[in-house]
Image (cartoon, rainbow, N blue to C red):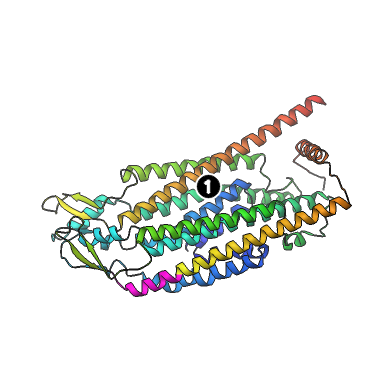
Amino acid sequence: MDWGALQTILGGVNKHSTSIGKIWLTVLFIFRIMILVVAAETVWGDEQDDFVCNTLQPGCKNVCYDHFFPISHIRLWALQLIFVSTPALLVAMHVAYRRHEKKRQFRKGDQKCEFKDIEEIRRQRFRIEGALWWTYTSSIFCRLAFEAVFMYAFYFMYDGFRMPRLMKCDAWPCPNVVDCFVSRPTEKTVFTIFMIAVSSICILLNVAELCYLLTKFFLRRSKRAGNQKHHPNHENKEETKQNEMNELISDSCQNPVIGFTS
Amino acid sequence: MSWGFLRDLLSGVNKYSTGIGRIWVAVVFIFRLLVYVVAAENIWKYEHDEFECNIKQPGCENVCFDHFFPVSHIRLWALQLIMVSTPSLLVVFHVAYRENREKHHKRRLYRSPGDIDGGLLCTYLTSLILKTGLEIVFLVLFYKLYNGFKVPRVVKCDISPCPNTVDCFISKPTEKMIFLYFLVATSCLCIVLNLSELSYLVFKHSIKCYLKRYIKRCQ
């Protein structure tokens, strides 16, 4: 269980994304997750071992490290990536729910079902409209919110995105103001700025995708309004609901044990 | 043998779960298992090496560490993940038993072996109750063992062979505390999901039974 598992889960979402969504997923996988695993984790790997304070007082180093790094950059990034990837699962769940409904219709032998077999249902790509549009748009909003929150948390916790070489610490049990030296500060600054830049690109991609979806929605709406003027087609929603209720009652009446003589 | 085994297990369980059950599996995978593997494990990796006491007396550090951390947070977390995922196996076993029975009798005995009704419903409800119970047990265990979910920076230790009361410093206490709170939050979320699923199933089947009886009475 590791980032590969998340990649497998998200890979399935790719099929039902817009083009911008697919670019976002690629950027996420290559420029964030892969960089985190292949490079960043090694840079921060020895962070506490090589954090050195100019004192022999036992405990001073631990306390100073904890004071300056309440939560390590690498863990914050890992959490950010997990939270930012999760809204895409809402879309995956919605698609799975729709597929499940279509399979149920197919098994009942519904005439309305236009698929020839279960495999076709499994392979079908759903268009982003109706309820799926709302789920997709909400997932983009959530992603944007999480990205913004984490970037702010980063900025707030570390007073900017620069990693200083030297930190002055006077937390107990340090006997006086002690100089503490961070390991690989320049490399860490470079990677921090890189990750922030890629986060910003992802935010821009999400905003672009949101604008695209909204534009598509309004265009479709105006097209439908135009069509309805020429071809009025009234759907009796009450009748559909009553039919569903009747189906539910007839389902519950059926004997669950179906046996037939050999 | 690693966490991949648990992941495959839970994927198998997913097939026979309700919608809420699938959300539970997703929460366990992503917010508990994945966070454990990619983030939490590394925080506690060198906890013993980085545990430092203000004394040169040999053995004092070891004894103090053992006194304050009888079972490390990270090991308790791993145990919790395993225990909480295991009751779902009851459902998998029951479905496999049903399928075996159909094969043995060479005829269709159930509408679908994976349908949650009859005996499988009882098994499913039992697994939900067990999962919730185990979550609560582990949360209480965490609370009792470590006097809450706080991780202090300094602990005072006076166990032999430490010659007097000695200051011992825990490494990364703030980071550990943040992740412990995360663990508690996800545990509580899973408890809420389990209880919702339990209520939903009980409610759904009560309505079904009531409707069945009502229709029989009408006939």
Magenta region includes residue B15: no
Residues A136 and B181: in front is A136
Residue at horizontal 70 percent and vertical 32 percent from the top = B209
Q: Main secondary structure of the magenta part?
A: helix
Residue B147 picture quarter = top left
What's under tag 1, amino acid-wise? Answer: Pro
Residue at horizontal 74 percent and vertical 58 percent from the top = A219
Residues A140 and B108: in front is A140
The residue singled out by tag 1 in the image is B87
**Where does residue A45 sit, x and y in percent of width and height?**
35, 69
Pick the quarter of the image with the C terminus of chain B.
Answer: top right
A101 relative to B171, above or below:
above
**Where does residue B181 sit, x and y in percent of width and height?**
40, 49
Task: Tell whether A259 sits left or right of B184.
Answer: right
Which residue, as the protein is rendered here, is positioned at the far left? B163
Q: Secondary structure at mark 1?
A: loop
Q: Which residues are magenta?
A: A182-194
B159 relative to A244, above or below:
below
A138 relative to A254, above or below:
below
**Where does residue A41 sit, x and y in percent of width and height?**
40, 70
Which residue, as the protein is rendered here, is positioned at the far top? B217
**Where does residue A76 sit, x and y in percent of width and height?**
42, 60
Residue at horizontal 77 percent and vertical 55 percent from the top = A222
Chain where mark 1 sits = B
